[in-house]
Amino acid sequence: MLEKLRPYITLVTTNHNYRRLWLSQIISSFGDWFGLLAVYAVLLVVAGVIWNFTVTAEERRYQRELVAEP
């Protein structure tokens, strides 16, 4: 398998411009992943707030029903 990668390894090690392009693409990909993780974190926080609000509203409605019953 290493023999199949040999031309690419040679290209990255010998061509300075290609190596810089390749490294910048790797850094950009990491940035995309961190951005995606941040979006997921925000969604979890927002979904948690909505979930807590929904549960709280349901609990309040249930408590009102309990108090209203004789």
Image: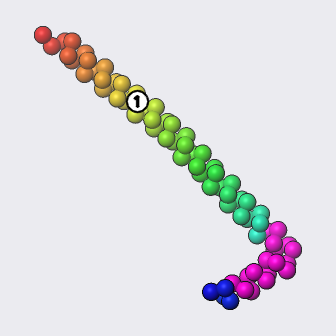
Q: Position of residue 27 (x, y in %)?
A: 73, 60
From the viewer's perspective, tell me whether residue 53 is left or right of residue 68. Answer: right
- Measured along the vertical axis of the image, is residue 19 above or below residue 7? above
**Scheme by which the image is coloured:** rainbow
From the viewer's perspective, tell me whether residue 33 is left or right of residue 69. Answer: right
Q: Which residue is mark 1?
A: 52
In front of the other: 32 or 12: 12
From the viewer's perspective, tell me whether residue 39 is left or right of residue 51. Answer: right
Type of amino acid under label 1 = Asn
From the viewer's perspective, tell me whether residue 33 is left or right of residue 17. Answer: left
In front of the other: 51 or 10: 10
**Quadrant the C terminus occupies:** top left
Residue drawn where x is 68% and y is 89% of the image = 3
Which SS type dominates the magenta stretch? helix
Residue drawn where x is 63% and y is 50% of the image = 35
**Quadrant the N terminus occupies:** bottom right
Residue sitting at the far bottom: 3
- Measured along the vertical axis of the image, is residue 42 above or below residue 49? below
Q: Quadrant of residue 61?
A: top left
Q: Secondary structure at mark 1?
A: helix
Residue sitting at the far front: 2
Q: Position of residue 2 (x, y in %)?
A: 67, 85
Q: Quadrant of residue 14?
A: bottom right
Residue drawn where x is 51% and y is 37% of the image = 45
Give neighbour class at mark 1: few <14, some 14-19, many 20+ (Cα, 10 Å): few
Q: Position of residue 4 (x, y in %)?
A: 66, 88
Residue drawn where x is 54% and y is 46% of the image = 40
Residue sitting at the far right: 16
In the rendered image, residue 13 lying in the magenta stretch gets the answer: yes
Which region of the structure is painted magenta? 5-21
- Measured along the vertical axis of the image, is residue 3 above or below residue 18? below
